[in-house]
Amino acid sequence: MEEKPNKFQVQETKHCRAHQVRYRFEVKVCDDSGNEGTFVIFDKEALKLVVRQAPDVMNEMNSGTATPQCVLDIVGRTCKFQVKVNDFNFKSARTTATVSRIIDDDLQNEKNDGKRQRLN
């Protein structure tokens, strides 16, 4: 599946008086047959794609960068997704599925070649 960023968000959440900056991506994906869908990717799995911590990306955005290069670099990547689907996905006006796991073939190949370390 190829990814094309639809929405990019770095969110700041407040829990227990602490601030936490997290990722939330909405990506438009399509498979080889041309079927399209929108997947929502949260912090842990998004980190596998951008390989930078959300606070660092947020600081870059606050200093004037519209969309950081690490986010632009996910366009055209080939990945396998494991998604969560429940009743809400079929009742909502917008059809999205939450990604629970990404198996990124590009990262796996680079890791095997020793070119890039994957963050878990």
Image: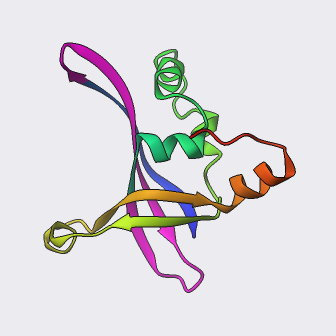
The residue drawn where x is 77% and y is 58% is: 109
The mark tally for this picture is: 0
- How far across and how far down the image is residue 62, in percent? 46, 17
**Quadrant of res 10:** top left
- Classify residue 83 as left or right of residue 75: left
Q: How is the image coloured?
A: rainbow
The residue drawn where x is 52% and y is 26% is: 57
Q: Is residue 24 above or below residue 112?
A: above
- Classify residue 97 as left or right of residue 65: left
Viewer-nearest residue: 11 or 84: 84
Viewer-nearest residue: 118 or 74: 118
Q: Is residue 69 above or below residue 62?
A: below
Report the magenta stretch's main SS: strand
**Quadrant of res 32:** bottom right
Q: Quadrant of the N terminus?
A: bottom right
Magenta-colored stretch includes residue 3: no
Q: Quadrant of the C terminus?
A: top right
Magenta-colored stretch includes residue 30: yes
- Classify residue 65 as left or right of residue 76: left
The residue drawn where x is 47% and y is 81% is: 35
- In the image as oriented, which residue stretches furthest toward the bottom? 33
Viewer-nearest residue: 6 or 103: 103
- Magenta segment boundaries in residue numbering: 14-39
- How far across and how far down the image is residue 92, in percent? 16, 67
- How far across and how far down the image is residue 28, in percent? 45, 62
Q: Is residue 11 above or below residue 72?
A: above
The residue drawn where x is 52% and y is 15% is: 63
- Classify residue 32 as left or right of residue 96: right
